[in-house]
């Protein structure tokens, strides 16, 4: 994750300092201590956290709903095509950004070349998005031009409102984020297969960070090794032919005992329909 700043809270005097033993991340907007969203290092217009860890290279035709969300010409986050003029991404990816600074590249296995680049006309962030808990981490992007569908660009199906995802469901997460491996290029799209994690187990894993909410779901292996990472934020978690999650946050990347945390799409299905017509 980016912005890995250790915060020490000074108390009444220099002689009394509170030590923190839990691994933590600090939101620079004075929010509570917790891991931050998975944004690329050096991101300047949002608070928070570049590649799939433990995965494999794929062609965009294997995840044709995947897009790269660009900020002023550079890849910043992922996203998913849900209709010809609508993309779903994470709210922390668009916080503080004007629509005119954003564009979406679709139809390419590379985030920096190929495919088609379309400007964003409007950003609709979920009104309940909370940067301190990273709850309701959803943004809808209305595009200035309709996407031309092909084998490299397709919309993804969505679950119904509150449709459950069973524990241990194998999902595919994809993106252009940090691989944590110098031999694996961040130029081309990559993916990893990860199983969903029981909600109570994930709640326990993140208890020191304030836990998770019902608008989140978790996926990963107990021993780590495969996960989304910085730069994958906003991208798709795909299972059973549907978009079940949006890459949101986590402690580290692919760390044992800390599964990736995703925004649960089924928790806001009605909101998506009301605001996009999809």
Image (cartoon, rainbow, N blue to C red):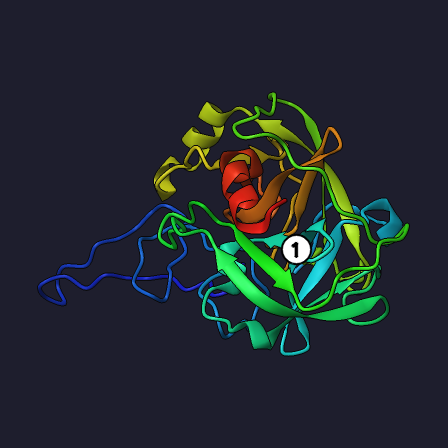
Task: Tell which of 105 and 155 is nearer to you.
Answer: 155
238 over 197 or under it: above or below:
below
Q: Which residue is mark 1?
A: 86
Kindly indicate the quadrant of the structure image that contains residue 196: top right
User: Along the horizontal axis of the image, is 213 left or right of 17?
Assistant: right
- Point out residue 199 in the picture as x, y percentages from the top left corner: 49, 26
- Point out residue 139 in the picture as x, y percentages from the top left corner: 53, 54
- Camera sees residue 258: no
User: Which quadrant of the figure contains the C terminus?
Assistant: top right
- Point out residue 180 in the picture as x, y percentages from the top left corner: 68, 56
What element does badge 1 sit on?
strand
144 over 166 or under it: above or below:
below
User: Along the horizontal axis of the image, is 148 left or right of 43?
Assistant: right
- Point out residue 4 in the picture as x, y percentages from the top left corner: 46, 62
Q: Residue furthest left?
A: 12
> Badge 1 local density, few (<14 within 10 Å), some, or many (20+)?
many
> Could you tell me which residue is drawn at 53 percent across and 24 percent down?
198
> Could you tell me which residue is drawn at 41 percent across and 56 percent down?
25
> Could you tell me which residue is drawn at 66 percent across and 55 percent down?
86
> Could you tell me which residue is drawn at 80 percent across and 62 percent down?
185
How many labels sit on residues?
1
Kindly indicate the quadrant of the structure image that contains residue 73: bottom right
User: Along the horizontal axis of the image, is 34 left or right of 258?
Assistant: left
- Camera sees residue 158: yes
Task: Tell which of 118 and 213 is nearer to you.
Answer: 118
77 over 260 or under it: above or below:
below
User: Which quadrant of the figure contains the N terminus?
Assistant: bottom right
Kindly indicate the quadrant of the structure image that contains residue 144: bottom right
């Amino acid at each position: 994750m980016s912005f890995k700043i250790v915060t020490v809270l000074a108390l009444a005097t220099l002689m009394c300092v509170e030590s923190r033993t839990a691994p933590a991340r600090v939101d620079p907007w004075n929010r509570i201590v917790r891991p931050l969203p998975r944004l690329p290092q050096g991101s300047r217009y949002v608070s928070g956290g570049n590649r799939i860890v433990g995965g494999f290279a794929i062609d965009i035709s294997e995840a044709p709903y995947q897009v790269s969300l660009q900020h002023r010409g550079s890849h910043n986050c992922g996203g998913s095509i849900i209709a010809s003029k609508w993309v779903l991404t994470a709210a922390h990816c668009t916080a503080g950004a004007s629509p005119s600074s954003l564009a979406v590249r679709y139809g390419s296995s590379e985030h920096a070349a190929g495919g088609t680049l379309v400007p964003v006309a409007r950003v609709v962030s979920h009104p309940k998005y909370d940067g301190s808990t990273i709850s309701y981490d959803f943004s809808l992007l209305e595009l200035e031009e309709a996407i031309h569908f092909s084998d490299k660009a397709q919309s993804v199906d969505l679950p119904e409102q509150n449709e459950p995802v069973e524990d241990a469901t194998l999902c595919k997460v994809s993106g252009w984020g940090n691989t944590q491996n110098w031999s694996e290029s961040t130029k081309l799209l990559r993916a990893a297969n990860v199983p969903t994690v029981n909600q109570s187990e994930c709640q326990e894993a993140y208890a020191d960070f304030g836990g998770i909410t019902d608008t989140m779901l978790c996926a990963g292996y107990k021993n780590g090794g495969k996960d989304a990472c910085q730069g994958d934020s906003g991208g798709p978690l795909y299972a059973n032919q549907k978009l079940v999650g949006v890459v949101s946050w986590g402690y580290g990347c692919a760390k044992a005992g800390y599964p990736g945390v995703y925004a649960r799409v089924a928790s806001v299905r009605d909101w998506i329909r009301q605001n996009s017509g999809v």
